[in-house]
Image (cartoon, coloured by chain):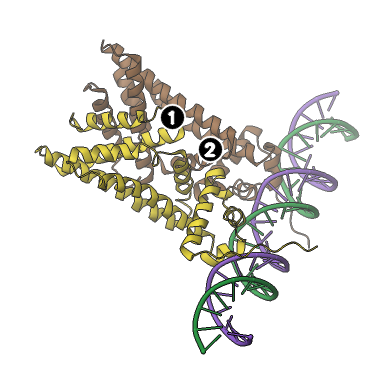
Chain colours: A brown, B yellow, C purple, D green
Amino acid sequence: MMTKRRTFHRSSPAERRSDLIAATQECIVQGGVGAATIRKVAEIADVTPGLVRHYFPDKKALLCATYQATMCAMTEQITLALNGCERGAAAKLRIFIEASLRPPVMQQRNHQLWASFRSLINADPTISAMHREAYLDYRNECQRLIRDLYVELSIAQPEKRIEGYAIAVNAVLDGLWLEGCLNEQLFARGELAELGVATVQAILGLETL
Amino acid sequence: MMTKRRTFHRSSPAERRSDLIAATQECIVQGGVGAATIRKVAEIADVTPGLVRHYFPDKKALLCATYQATMCAMTEQITLALNGCERGAAAKLRIFIEASLRPPVMQQRNHQLWASFRSLINADPTISAMHREAYLDYRNECQRLIRDLYVELSIAQPEKRIEGYAIAVNAVLDGLWLEGCLNEQLFARGELAELGVATVQAILGLETL
DNA sequence: TTACCGGTTATACAGACGGACAATAACATC
DNA sequence: GATGTTATTGTCCGTCTGTATAACCGGTAA
């Protein structure tokens, strides 16, 4: 009963870590959090189960790292788009909306991951804290862009109203993102982004995006 | 080693079924889908594990029934509010918005259940189909209310534009519902409902809600 | 009373799970 | 080239899971 030993391959720690996280994402996408078992993750990453524990002290740590990586990847895409534009506040807000409502941010895969982790909010305080932080970051970015826009247009608005706008705009983007992710083939490419821009214009009472 | 046998109690089938579904919901709320094990469900329903299988052929059936019950309970609350009002289209739309953005529909518990089942969409085609149906029902209801409103106001609108409005309004309600469920204590009671009405007014270009 | 039947309980079982650990292979340092 | 270090492998264990099945109980009808 001599089974051949698996070929030994060594990768850089950063690469291995990222591979394991990617494998975890793949599991979750395919079958929810419950499908992300240590064994399955190891199999997808083409590695033995023991190695997973060498990089992450326990399963919870692996899941948290995966959540973090997932959210970072999305916000990174948006800041990337935002940094590529040095024009005014209106253009920035438009780009923020469009980046949020197009691939690679608006993608069924991302939604699947997002919903899966969100389902753990009551179960794990760490996940809960990470979620809250990501949510507030996004909403504050939203609010900042809206404030800058009114300043640029020399329209005075009380901060309280701007906050209300931010909540509403955030809600629209969340909602359209959800719809778009779930029906990737139902909407033409860019359709939801356009609808998002038009809707935000209506909410802000502007026609200048 | 004589452990006392559990007291024998017989309930009506409908009641037992509903108890088991409620217990499943409780598990999911506390710890996500993974926490809803047959044994835990049975414990919460104060019943032995074997009985669960007597009412549901397997775990998947139990989860699907729970999903169905969860969504039905929410839409039922909304139709209930809608039926209690025999006034015009504007009032109906307002009530639809407010019912969606107040307890008992807007409730952390509901959100937890919603996210949990949504995380299974890729894993189970039955869940996927049920979700799609619920989503389209809600959006169509939305679209119908908007169409009726414009008819009432004698404003001609191409159906294509009404569809766009419905998508946007649906997105706002989804988004605000998400925000509200997750921060039940952050918003004053009715604050999001008001914000929702104002935002929908802005989207539809009306001030008559 | 008695015999039956379906709801209910208790227990058994095979498989998968997370975590722990020793053995092994590649690399780093001297 | 020898030696220590770290990444990686293979294997084990106790626990928990979903499911199957046997034993039990209480009402119902003959």
| Amino acid identity at mark 1 | Gln
Pointer 2 residue: A121
Whether residue B200 appears in this view of the structure is: yes
Circle 1 crowding by C-alpha within 10 Å: few under 14, some 14–19, many from 20 = some
> Where is residue A44 drawn, in percent x and y?
59, 48
Pointer 1 residue: A77
Q: Residue at x 44, y 53 (%)?
A: B67
Q: Residue at x 51, y 32 (%)?
A: A131
Q: Quadrant of residue A64?
A: top right
| Amino acid identity at mark 2 | Ile
Q: Earlier in the sequence, mark 2 or mark 1?
A: 1
> Where is residue A188 drawn, in percent x and y?
28, 42
Q: Residue at x 58, y 34 (%)?
A: A125
The CA distance from mark 2 to mark 1 is 24 Å
Foreground pick, B120 / B192:
B192
Q: Quadrant of residue A107?
A: top left
From what the image shows, is residue C8 above or below residue B18? below
Circle 2 crowding by C-alpha within 10 Å: few under 14, some 14–19, many from 20 = many
Q: Residue at x 25, y 26 (%)?
A: A201
Foreground pick, B102 / A110:
B102
Q: Chain of mark 2?
A: A
Q: Which mark is residue A208?
A: none
The kind of secondary structure element at disc 1 is helix
Foreground pick, A132 / B181:
B181
Q: Chain of mark 1?
A: A
The kind of secondary structure element at disc 2 is loop
